[in-house]
Image: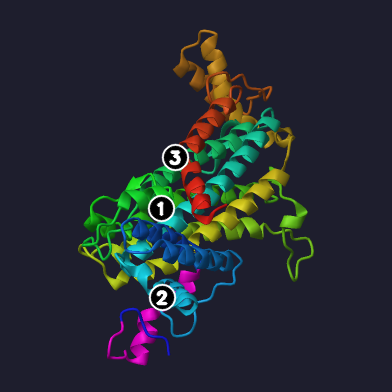
Amino acid sequence: MVQKLWEKSVQVNKEIERFTVGRDREMDLYLAKYDVLGSMAHITMLESIGLLEKDELASLLAELKRIYASAEKGEFVIEEGVEDVHSQVELMLTRRLGDVGKKIHSGRSRNDQVLLDLKLFTRSRIKDIAEEVEGLFQVLIRQSERYKEVLMPGYTHLQVAMPSSFGLWFGAYAESLVDDMLFLQAAFKMCNRNPLGSAAGYGSSFPLNRTMTTRLLGFDSLNYNVVYAQMGRGKMERNVAFALATIAGTLSKLAFDACLFNSQNFGFVKLPDECTTGSSIMPHKKNPDVFELIRAKCNKLQSLPQQIMMIANNLPSGYFRDLQIIKEVFLPAFQELEDCLRMTTYIMTEIRVNEHILDDDRYTLMFSVEEVNRLAREGMPFRDAYKKVGLDIEAGKFTHAKTVHHTHEGSIGNLCNAEISALMRQVVDGFNFGGMETAEKALLGR
């Protein structure tokens, strides 16, 4: 039987163990390779302060690289009876290397181990999300340019309002993603600080070199105060969840628009046939199930910050087991959002727009403001022009050439897509993912 890291002479009740371990073995598989990376940095530092011999470090690093490779391939497992990823890694080292494997925990607690694992996992997954967002952004900008001359109705209160264009529609979601990425960048910078060495939240009497582990792991800086490092558990996840939720909010709105505009009563866009599903009874149906699921998944993701907040909200300083439950909602969220981003990118690449929407005279009245503005430019007071056009509409006499002449920044005739793209480039460059990538490759000898 495997002994717990904390177990002494009394064995815990089996039902208590089942309840307290919960889904940790399942959730910790997300963290396995990051736990190994953290251990590699930690023991390198331990050797530098005399708590490990050079030959011990060499054998431990070689074995940890082997474990990392198995985690990368998806072959790493947490055995029955082993509580968590930290225990499994230490067990594997001890089996292969004997007592030297037991030395890796010096100066650490599982509290700062899981903090570190979560931060390493999260910053890596933020990079994945950022790349997917940037990919979708580029598709939206291309489609905005491709269809910038195609007019469509704009709506307020779901009533036909004023002329819009597909250039504006695609471009609006592109610019929304710029703000979302700025939020994600802030979350990344808060995440990319090193908690290792805070131990159980009160530091260690070992002369740990926390600056060294910060450099080895490619963090921007330390979580300096050891109490605050532990207080950051839950806070980091909540902040990142807000960033994920804001991206999800953009996708959800886009998905709703696409479902609405694809319906026969609108007919503004056509989704790729291979991205729609049929009905078991109605042979004509082509349902936008993908976007409906994206809408639902993204609405669920928008509740993630509140779930985390409700778990961590009333906890005082120090560690509490409540925080374990956050992993269950937080860790899977990245893959769910990444899937939604990939599906949206694919469909937005293949979507086709109706270039003859305005052939239908039901949309003529949306040019009423254009006519008011034309009269005002010719010298008629705006309020008089407004009244004249309104009376023409009531009398059924309003007509218009269905053309627009908008020139100001961000309007139909001046989309500012180059400026929006420059903003996105600036935000992407501001992440500076290179530091963490270089450090991780150096640790792994790649």
In this rendering, would 230 be left or right of 175?
Answer: left
Query: Closer to the camera: disc 3 or disc 2?
Result: 2
Give the mark, 1 or 2, whose residue is nearer the N terminus: 2
Residue under the image location 57 percent in, 18 percent down? 407
Asked whether the beta carbons under mark 1 and mark 3 sit within 8 Å of each other, the answer is no
- Work out whether residue 164 or residue 146 is closer to the camera in this orientation and state it: 146
Give the mark, 3 or 2, whose residue is nearer the N terminus: 2
Report helix, strand or loop for mark 1.
Answer: helix
Q: Position of residue 386 (x, y in %)?
A: 49, 21
- Which quadrant holds the N terminus? bottom left
Tell me, yes or no, whether the highlighted magenta stretch contains residue 411: no
Reading the image, the residue beneath label 3 is 182
Reading the image, the residue beneath label 1 is 240
Mark count: 3
Asked whether the beta carbons under mark 1 and mark 2 sit within 8 Å of each other, the answer is no
Reading the image, the residue beneath label 2 is 87
Amino acid type at image mark 3? Leu
In this rendering, would 196 be left or right of 2?
Answer: left
Query: Can you say whether 14 is above or below 243 in the image?
Result: below
Q: Which residues are magenta?
A: 7-29
Report helix, strand or loop for mark 2.
Answer: helix
On the question of residue 248 being in view, the answer is no
Residue under the image location 26 percent in, 50 percent down? 224
In this rendering, would 249 be left or right of 168?
Answer: left
